[in-house]
Amino acid sequence: MIFLKVEDNHSNLFCLKIELQKSSKSSTLLRDTIYYKLLQQSVLIMKSQLAFLFVVLFTGSVFAQVTLKKVTESELYQTPPFKQCHASTLVQLSNGTFLAAAFGGTQEGNTDVSIWLSRYEKGKWQAPEKVATGASADGNVYPNWNPVLYKITPETLTLFYKTGPSPREWWGMYKVSTDEGKTWGPAQRLPDGILGPIKNKPITLVNGTLLAPSSTETRTTDGLSWKAHIEKSVDGGKHWEKIPIDPNTPYDVIQPSILVHTQDTLQILCRSRNDALMQAFSYDGGNTWSSITKTRLPNPNSGTDALTLSNGKHLLVYNPLINGKNDRSKLHIAYSEDGIAWEDVYVLESHKRGEYSYPAIIQDSENKIHVTYTYERKNIKHLTFNIL
């Protein structure tokens, strides 16, 4: 237990009692944990003001002993029907099988890039099926991007995806299945200004509120501008509200994933063009958000995905590098008890060159962890883990 007296920027004095799970050898990790607790109490204080904590000595570790034991490893496509593929998504079905999707074609951005669906049953991935193309009502054909599979209700499976010439000009699309993805309804366009989950899965709060992590990429006179936002629905996706996240941030951020601390306290982790994974917090169930700040984790302008486990702890899949040559050649899984202090617990890929990127992570009904990711743009890897 730690007791702090803290004065904010308005000379208000706060007495805080902070209970930590375990003590720590690392004062930087402890500082980050305390900073997060201060944010929860709405105390305006800079991390540098917590430097006095460095003089305190601690023993033990802030992390529990967590081990991921690999159970299976496979590739989605035995004979890929396309030259390149990317941006996988994964969902468990009610009968214990799984569906995955990715976009595939000759090359990202080409008009033949479609959404391909794969089914996992009887211990292996079945041959992929093309489920969405970029054929448009105007007679043109556009590339497709970034599918996201999500069960909004137990009876309905939704496939969100993007269609358009580029991420600056694309629009949100979706299809709905009521038979576990065996057949699909017609392609439908989301309302103007709504893109759907841009890369990572939505979450559904206990009250039924659906929150889709999204973002925009806009070309301005000053160059590219990347902004994250949340798309909220309280009626199962029939209507949507766009909620901005720190629109005046100096950072360029996209592709958030959502961690759930409580039904009110949420956290996003975002890809950035600033060499660091970025974060923001909500304390009212996603209706308003804090400023975007840097985490202590690197990011080489590459997509990540994160997950809150059934026990309230968190996993993150990310490229542990900064922007540069071969910056997607390593892919790790990290663990956190509080969403602030992270520790790598598994190395998925570690190479001098190559691309291993754009992960998706879920936990199934038996608490097993599933991770899919792009493997050299030639295939999609799928690994499962037990948490020990």
Image (cartoon, rainbow, N blue to C red):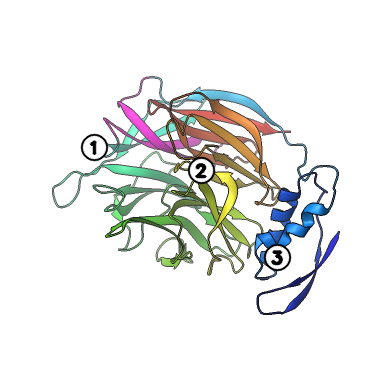
Asked if the magenta segment contains residue 103, the reply would be yes
Q: Which residue is mark 3?
A: 38
Q: Quadrant of residue 195?
A: bottom left
Q: Position of residue 203 (x, y in %)?
A: 54, 55
Dot placed on the residue nearer the N-terminal end, 1 or 2:
1
Along the viewing direction, whichever of 301 and 332 lies nearer the viewer = 301
Q: Residue at horizontal 15%, vertical 46%?
A: 140
Say which mark, if any, is on residue 110. Answer: 1
Answer whether labels 1 and 2 touch (C-beta < 8 Å).
no
Vertical side of 92 occupied by 128: above or below: above
Q: Which residue is mark 2?
A: 299
Say which mark, if any, is on residue 246. Answer: none
Q: What's drawn in magenta, residue-wise?
A: 79-107
Q: Nearer the viewer, mark 1 or mark 2?
A: 2
Q: Residue at horizontal 43%, vertical 61%?
A: 237
* Residue type pointed to by label 2: Asn
Q: Specify whether 144 is left or right of 380.
A: left
Dot 3 falls on a residue whose secondary structure is helix
Locate the C terminus by quadrant: top right
Asked if the magenta segment contains residue 60, the reply would be no
Q: Quadrant of residue 342?
A: top right
Dot 1 falls on a residue whose secondary structure is loop
Q: Position of residue 280 (x, y in %)?
A: 56, 59
Q: Residue at horizontal 76%, vertical 74%?
A: 14
